[in-house]
Image (spheres, rainbow, N blue to C red):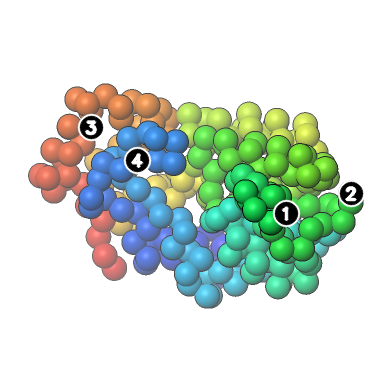
Amino acid sequence: MKNIKEQVMEVLIKQKAFILEGGPFFSSGGLKVPFFVDIRRLSSDPKTLKLIARYFAEIVKENECDYIAGMETAGIPYATAISLEADVPFFYIRKKPQDHGLKSTIATLPPKEDAKIALVDDAVGGGGAITLFLENLKKEDYNNVKLFLYIVEADIMQKAEKRIDELKNQGVTCHYIITWKEWVDYMLKNNQISEKLAQYCYEFIENPLSFANEEKLSRYCKDKENGLLWIREK
C-alpha cells in the first residue's frame, strides 16, 4: 500500500496540478514564474481531503490542540476537514481585518483565551504568509499557536530549515507531507516529467529569482515550444 506521500503525489499528477500551458505566470509575491503548481486542486477531491484530514487529525490530537485555524483562503477547506476528523473546534483567520462588523481577523467561533491552536495552510513558499497570520493572531491576543500543518513545503532557496527552526523557537512545530523536490523526483522517476523540465524545477527551487532573467525565461519558452518539456498522462 502506498504511503501518504505517494498518495498525495499521485493525486497531484492525476489532477494535473503541474501547469505548463499559459505561462509564464506570476506568483502571489509578484515573481514571474515559468510554471504553476496548483496545490488547491487537492481539496476538490473528497477522498484526498479525507486522507489529509485523518493524517493531520492524529497530530492535532497527539498535541492536545484546542482549536484548528484555517489560513485564508487555501487553508480553510483543510482546517474544516481536520476539525471534523479530530472533533476539535475550527475557525479561520483573515489576511486583514474586515472594514465592517467586528473588524476582526478572526472569523467564525473565536477561540478561548490561552487555547492551543493548530494553524493550517496548503503550502509554503517563501514563508511570508505564516508570519503574517501569526502576527494577526497576536493582535487578537492569541499567543499559543502550537502547530503549523501544511501539505507542500516548497523549500525555496533552502529556506525551510531556517524557517522551521525560527518557528520552533516561538513554540510552533511544523508538520508537512511532501516537499516540492520530492514531488519532482517522484514525477521524474515515474516517467511523468522530462529530465529537462525537472532540471528547470530544481533550478527554480534553488533560486526562483534566476527566472527573472529574460534570457533564461526565453530559453525555457523555446524548450517548451520544441516539445522538450512535457508531462505524460497515464
Instruction: Verify CB contact (< 8 Å) between mark 1 and mark 3.
Output: no
Please report whichever mark, 1 or 4, sits nearer to the chain's N-terminal start.
4
Instruction: Verify CB contact (< 8 Å) between mark 2 and mark 4.
Output: no
The quadrant in which residue 167 appears is top right
Residue 188 pos. (x, y %): 34, 50
Residue tagged by mark 4? 26
The disc placed on residue 217 is 3
Q: Secondary structure at mark 4?
A: strand
- Label 2 and label 1: CA atoms lie apart by 21 Å
Label 2 packing within 10 angstroms: few (<14), some (14-19), many (20+):
few
Say which of marks 1 and 4 sits in front: 1
Please report whichever mark, 2 or 4, sits nearer to the chain's N-terminal start.
4
Query: Residue type at mark 3?
Result: Leu
Residue 169 pos. (x, y %): 77, 31
- Label 1 and label 3: CA atoms lie apart by 46 Å
Instruction: Verify CB contact (< 8 Å) between mark 1 and mark 4.
Output: no
Residue at 13% x, 38% y is 222
Query: Residue type at mark 4?
Result: Phe
Counting every numbered tag in the picture gives: 4
Label 1 packing within 10 angstroms: few (<14), some (14-19), many (20+):
few
Describe residue 9's horizontal placement relative to residue 100 as left or right: left
Residue tagged by mark 2? 114
Q: Secondary structure at mark 2?
A: loop
Instruction: Verify CB contact (< 8 Å) between mark 2 and mark 1.
Output: no
Describe residue 24's horizontal placement relative to residue 225 as left or right: right
Task: Examine the rendered structure and indicate whether residue 211 appears above or below residue 77.
Answer: above
Of 217 and 196, the residue lying toward us: 217
Please report whichever mark, 1 or 3, sits nearer to the chain's N-terminal start.
1
Q: Secondary structure at mark 3?
A: helix
Query: Residue type at mark 2?
Result: Asp
Residue tagged by mark 1? 102
